[in-house]
């Protein structure tokens, strides 16, 4: 009696046979949207952003006392961004080495995807942040600021520029969601580890920024969604067809 194949073996077998899973986009796009859209709407409808920011603000004695703390500001806020940049430069170095060494040739395209997906996601979030005109909690009345609060879908006043949405620092972690698709194309058994690393880093940086008064909860949620969609879109454009015809077992 034949033993059932493991999930990784099924992924390898499907890719080696030139067949992508029929429900790939249903699982990776539709399910993601079905989770994100209700969450984003719920945050807005029930005013969870302000309620959560208020709790954090009150817990610090009606002040953002962690805004300039060494751990929150220097270690996590600045250090997390430097860690992401260092990781990207390390991946760039490996890609350059792969260009020069023939035995690493099979890694060139997956590494190119990883570099492009992480950089594109982070840059897109930063670009959106520059024109969405949304305030940080520390700018808003009731949380130590002077500006009235405007929800995500509310009209913005002219003459005042906010640059806090989406959460750019959190995207330094969430942009590494591309690791999930990188490993899906190369070492499928590590894809969940890549996903966990990206989410863990994004949540750590994002929550720290919320503690500092730099972002509302929804700012991080939108950064997460943007980074996932960029990673998925570039995977479809760059890696999906290749992994349908090249078995990941070859990437050694």
Image (spheres, rainbow, N blue to C red):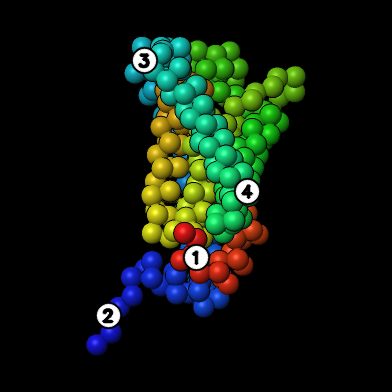
The picture places residue 204, in percent across and down from the top left corner, at: 41, 32
The reply to whether residue 111 is in sight is: yes
Tell me if mark 4 has few (under 14), some (14-19) or many (20+) residues whose alpha carbon lies within 10 angstroms of its own. few
Closest to the camera, between mark 2 and mark 4, is 4
Query: Nearer the N terminus, badge 2 or badge 4?
Result: 2
Q: Secondary structure at mark 3?
A: loop
Q: Is residue 154 visible?
A: no
Q: Is residue 235 above or below residue 202?
A: below
Q: CA distance from mark 1 to mark 4?
A: 18 Å
Q: Residue at x 52, y 31 (%)?
A: 86
Residue at x 51%, y 69% (from the top left corner):
247
For the residues bearing labels 1 and 2, Cβ distance under 8 angstroms = no
Judge whether 20 appears above or below 100 on screen: below
- Contact? badges 3 and 2 (CB < 8 Å): no
Q: Of discs 1 and 4, which sits in the foreground?
A: 4
Q: Earlier in the sequence, mark 4 or mark 3?
A: 3
Asked if 248 appears above or below 133 in the picture, the reply is below
Which residue is located at x 55 percent, y 31 percent? Answer: 85
Report the residue that reaches farthest toward the right: 159
Q: Which residue is mark 2?
A: 3
Task: Indicate which label's residue lies in the foreground, 3 or 2.
Answer: 2
| Label 4 SS | helix
Q: CA distance from mark 4 to mark 3?
A: 53 Å
Residue bearing mark 1: 250
Residue 100 marker: 4
Q: CA distance from mark 2 to mark 4?
A: 42 Å
């Amino acid at each position: 009696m034949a033993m059932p194949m493991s999930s990784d073996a099924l992924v390898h077998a499907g890719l080696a046979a030139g067949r992508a899973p029929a429900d790939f986009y249903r699982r990776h796009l539709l399910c993601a949207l079905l989770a994100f859209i209700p969450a984003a709407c719920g945050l807005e409808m029930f005013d969870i952003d302000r309620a959560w920011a208020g709790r954090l603000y009150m817990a610090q004695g009606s002040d953002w006392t962690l805004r300039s703390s060494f751990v929150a500001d220097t270690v996590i806020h600045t250090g997390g961004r430097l860690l992401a940049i260092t990781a990207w430069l390390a991946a760039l170095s490996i890609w350059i080495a792969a260009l020069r060494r023939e035995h690493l040739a099979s890694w060139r395209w997956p590494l190119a995807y990883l570099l492009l997906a992480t950089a594109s996601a982070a840059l897109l979030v930063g670009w959106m942040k520059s024109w969405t005109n949304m305030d940080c909690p520390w700018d808003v009345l009731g949380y130590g600021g002077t500006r009235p609060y405007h929800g995500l879908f509310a009209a913005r006043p002219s003459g005042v520029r906010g640059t806090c949405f989406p959460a750019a620092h959190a995207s330094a972690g969430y942009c590494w969601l591309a690791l999930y698709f990188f490993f899906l194309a190369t070492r499928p058994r590590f894809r969940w580890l890549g996903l966990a690393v990206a989410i863990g880093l994004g949540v750590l940086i994002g929550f720290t920024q919320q503690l500092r008064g730099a972002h509302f909860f929804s700012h991080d949620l939108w950064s997460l969604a943007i980074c996932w969609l960029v990673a998925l879109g570039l995977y479809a454009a760059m890696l999906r067809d290749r992994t349908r015809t090249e078995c990941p077992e070859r990437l050694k």
